[in-house]
């Protein structure tokens, strides 16, 4: 990978704030936009998916769109306790891609940093919308799994009677469950720093902190 002199300055900026854990979701937004064109989709299919959806919050293609389309096409039929044709993201696959990003850009990322980056990306992905122009529409919404204390990104067609399917979930956090009776976070969230700690917050209060 060849960087010009300006790109080296930009990369060094992100390297410093990531390694010192001083970033928030807006820094990660900028970082994803910066590295987006430098990642090949064959090796970074999931990270480029999220980089694309952050760059374009209203999408007509990609992994999420494909899953929404498959679920609708198959009428949410279940196979082996999963929605037919729907393939979400596993934490290990996600973590492995970030470890490759760490190596590619020479940015030290331990487990805590990857978790914090993921929280930022989950926040940024909230309420992104999808429409393939052929009648298949959907959006991403944020949930808390109250049983496992995990954060979840779920897709839905967005109607009052629509199903929700978990696309990705991770973590076991100390979550303020009193804020949400059924785990659905309808309020806009924000991943920000408070006294050096990354917190996920909304108008109701702090949801969790790292």
Image: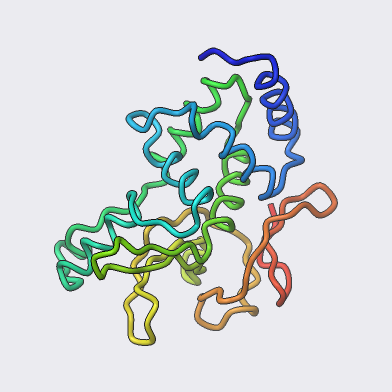
Q: Residue 205's image quarter? A: bottom right
Compared with residue 81, is residue 191 higher up or lower down, i.e. above or below?
Answer: above
Q: Which residue is at the front of the view, 122 or 134?
A: 134
Tell me if 43 is positioned left or right of 146 in this view: left
Query: What is the x, y in percent for residue 47?
Result: 45, 40
Q: Residue 133's image quarter? A: bottom left
What residue is shown at x 21% (from left), y 61% (from top)?
70
Query: What is the x, y in percent for residue 180?
Result: 58, 79
Compared with residue 192, is residue 18 higher up or lower down, i.e. above or below?
Answer: above
Tell me if 30 is positioned left or right of 132 in this view: right
| Figure label count | 0
Q: Which residue is at the front of the view, 9 or 44?
A: 9
Query: What is the x, y in percent for residue 112?
Result: 62, 41
Rendering colour mode: rainbow
Q: Residue furthest right?
A: 195
What residue is shown at x 37% (from left), y 37% (from top)?
45
What residue is shown at x 72% (from left), y 21% (from top)?
9
Compared with residue 92, is residue 176 higher up or lower down, i.e. above or below?
Answer: below
Tell me if 162 is positioned left or right of 16 in this view: left
Tell me if 57 is positioned left or right of 112 in this view: left
Compared with residue 187, is residue 58 higher up or lower down, i.e. above or below?
Answer: above
Q: Which residue is at the front of the view, 91 or 120?
A: 120
Q: Which residue is at the front of the view, 136 or 49?
A: 136
What residue is shown at x 34% (from left), y 49% (from top)?
62
């Amino acid at each position: 990978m060849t960087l010009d002199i300006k790109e080296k300055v930009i990369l060094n900026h992100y390297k410093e704030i990531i390694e010192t854990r001083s970033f928030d979701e807006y820094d990660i937004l900028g970082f994803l936009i910066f590295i987006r064109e430098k990642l090949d989709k064959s090796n970074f299919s999931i990270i480029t998916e999220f980089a694309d959806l952050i760059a374009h919050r209203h999408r007509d293609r990609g992994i999420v769109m494909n899953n929404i389309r498959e679920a609708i096409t198959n009428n949410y039929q279940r196979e082996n306790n999963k929605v037919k044709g729907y393939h979400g993201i596993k934490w290990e696959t996600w973590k492995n891609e970030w470890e490759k990003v760490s190596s590619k850009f020479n940015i030290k990322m331990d487990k805590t940093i990857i978790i914090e980056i993921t929280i930022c990306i989950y926040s940024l992905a909230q309420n992104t919308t999808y429409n393939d122009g052929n009648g298949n529409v959907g959006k991403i919404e944020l949930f808390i799994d109250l049983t496992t204390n995990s954060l979840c990104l779920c897709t839905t067609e967005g109607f009052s009677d629509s199903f929700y399917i978990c696309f990705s979930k991770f973590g076991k956090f100390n979550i303020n469950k009193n804020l949400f009776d059924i785990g659905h976070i309808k309020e806009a969230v924000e991943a920000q720093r408070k006294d050096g700690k990354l917190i996920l917050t909304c108008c109701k209060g702090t949801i969790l902190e790292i």
